[in-house]
Each structure stands twice: as C-alpha cells, then as structure tokens.
Amino acid sequence: MPNRRHFLAGLAASSLVPLRGWASVGAPDYLAAALFPDGSYRLAGLDTGGDILFALPLPARGHAAAAHPVNAQAVAFARRPGTFALVIDCATGTELTRLTAPEGRHFFGHGVFSPDGTRLFTTENDYEAGEGVIGIWNAADYRRLGEFPSGGIGPHDMRLMPDGQTLVIANGGIETHPDMGRTKLNLPTMQPRLSYLDLNGTVLEQVELPQALHKNSIRHLAVRQDGLVAFAMQWQGDKAQHPPLLGLHRRGEAPRLLSSPDAEQSTLQGYAGSIAFSGDGEAIAITCPRGNALHQFNVASGLLTGAFSLEDVCGLGPGPRGFVFTTGTGIVGELTSKVQISARPDCQWDNHLIPIRPAA
C-alpha cells in the first residue's frame, strides 16, 4: 500500500511546476537496478527502510547508476560491455536522452558527476587499444566533450573524492574485447591499479598491489569523507588461494589489505561484489555473492567484526545504524550488530546500491 512518502512524491511529479530536487521523488537514499516480475529491467529509488519510491524502465539489464548532485536525475548504465546509458528524469519518469558509447568504446557500468553537476564522467574501454578511458559529457545536453586515459586497463568503478577535484578510479587490469564477450585476455600479465586523476585527466597518484597479487582485480570503491578510499577485489588466480578481497588506501601511503581468518575467507570464492563504509564511517564491509556472505571489519583495527550468511547478497550502502544491503532474492535489509530484513519487494536486485548522498 502506498505510504505518505509515495503520495507526496506522486503529487510533486504530477504538479504543473514539478520540483527538480530529490525531494520531488520522496528523497530516496539509494539507486539500484533490478529485474521485476513482469520481466522488465528498471532503475529504482529506495529509502533506508526498503520502500521503492520510483521504478523506471530500462531497455536491458542495468549495472550501476550515477545520481545528479542537485536534480532528481539519474544516469543508469548497462552491464558491461554495454553501449547505452539512460538519462532519466526521476520526477517525471521520462527518458531525457540516451548516451551511446563512441565507436570503439563501451561502458563499464559506472560514472560520476562533477560536484556542480555540469559534467558526467564515465568509465569506458578503448577495446582496440586495450586501454581504459574516462569519457566526459556535458550534463546540460549530454553532448560528448572528450575523453582522457584512465591510468590503466579495465576501469570499472570510479568515485569523486571529497575535495571535489579528484577522481579515484578502479583500474581492474583485465583486458577484454566485446567480440570476445566477457573473456579475459591478459590474465598472465594483468596489473590492477588504483588511479587518482584530476578532472582534466592529469594523473596525480598511482597505486599498485604487490606482484604476488597482480591477479587481484580492483573492481569497486567506497570513499569516506576524510578521503580514505576502500576497494573491493576479485581474484583471477589459483582458486586454492584465498587472498585479501578488501583494501584501504589514503593518498601518499601504501595500501592496507584486510582479510578474514582463513576458515571464513576460503568460503568467499575469491570474489567481492560491493563495498561500503558504514553510516558513521567506523566500519567497512564487502558483499560476496558467490560465497553468499557479507563480511564486516573495523576500519581502525582491520579486524573482522562479523561474518554473515546471506543468499546472493551484493548491493551494499551506508545506513543510519550501519549498512543497508540488497540481494538477488529480493531482500532489502539492514546490518547493525545483526541482520534485519526490512522489506521483500517482488524483484531481483542487481549488483549495487548507489548512495545519492555521501556517507560520513
């Protein structure tokens, strides 16, 4: 049954002069892609309690999305190697435009707006050159303005640092080509890299893992408001090994890798999906859908503080009392000292829970 927030969102969306801010759609906390029971793929706006405030159609399966910092506007990205990104007015439910990757490029499923909302940056693959690029788009009309190198191969996730002037990019290190589907072409020589670039593409800092971990692909990111970066990894090496899947990095320092005790780490199948800081910033967690697990760590000590069993858990975001998570089985839940199920919408949530506002 629609609640008061749904009702107010409907009034705002149908008014003669609709509000442009996120309050016009009920002030959602997250964006998430999902498969709905009628077979449609949609981008949804969620609050921390699991209420779906809007669910707008996508032409195919989505991966992640970028939320405009001011307007109730989202860019939903196709799952790699997709070539579309849909720009949606969430207040009216209308498709404003559709971005198409230039010839020789495809999207990697992530993007971020500049602090003033005038530009959109997108992670892309220059697949003939086997190099990563960052696309630049004018957010007023979504014209392509240009691109610059990402600082590595296979840029996947990307976040804006708290200074508003720096991008941090998860260059996963894996070369792919759309003619080969999702085949990984360079595993023996891959080199994941965390890259810091300014908004003009100048490389400010590059961070690489130890050589023994060169097959640990850096995939997804979270950034705390003091500039601490967390990254989730996916192991491409010997499955009998159980390397760390979570790292922390502060500019100018060496990366710090966190791992669960081997009994727990060995069940994760070398794959971390999403990553997030808790709402207060004191904890960090990763989801591991292949291992049906969510692992939480204390940031200061680096110690595991909770290992939770959750079927097909992947989406993860900061919550008011810890974390909010989603699963492919349709659950929206909250993790504090224990797992609590908030809602069971009739849909299958995809990989990510994208916060609309930054965490602590």
Image: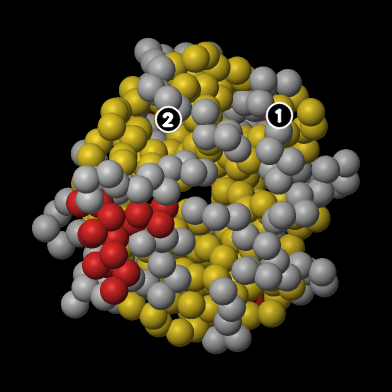
Q: Is residue 184 visible?
A: no
State the mark number for residue 197: 1
Residue occupying the far front of the picture: 16
**Relative to 108, residue 136 above or below:** above
- Between 192 and 13, the one nearer to me in the picture: 13
**Which label sits on residue 100?**
none
Question: What secondary structure is marked by label 2?
Answer: strand
Earlier residue among tags 2 and 1: 2
Residue 174 position, x and y percent, is 55, 34
Vertical order, 341 against 276 (above or below): below
Residue at image coords 41%, 17%: 143
In the picture shown, does residue 280 fall above or below 339? above
Q: Residues within 10 Å of mark 1 (few under 14, many from 20)?
A: many
Residue 212, image x, y percentages: 75, 45
Q: Residue at x 57, y 65 (%)?
A: 318
Q: Determine whether, in the image, residue 13 is placed left or right of residue 129.
A: left
Q: How are the colours assigned in the image?
A: secondary structure
The disc labelled 1 sits on which kind of residue?
A: Leu
Q: Under tag 1, what secondary structure?
A: strand
Q: Is residue 248 left or right of residue 272?
A: right
Q: Residue at x 55, y 55 (%)?
A: 357
Residue indicated by mark 2: 107
Quarter placement of the N terminus:
bottom left
Label 2 to label 1: alpha-carbon separation = 19 Å
Residue 158: % across, % down? 58, 39
The answer to whether residue 356 is seen in the rendering is yes
Residue type for callout 2: Phe
Residue 198 in picture, x, y percent from top left = 71, 27
Give the image quarter of residue 241.
bottom right
Left or right relative to 28: residue 253: right
Towards the viewer: 303 or 236: 303
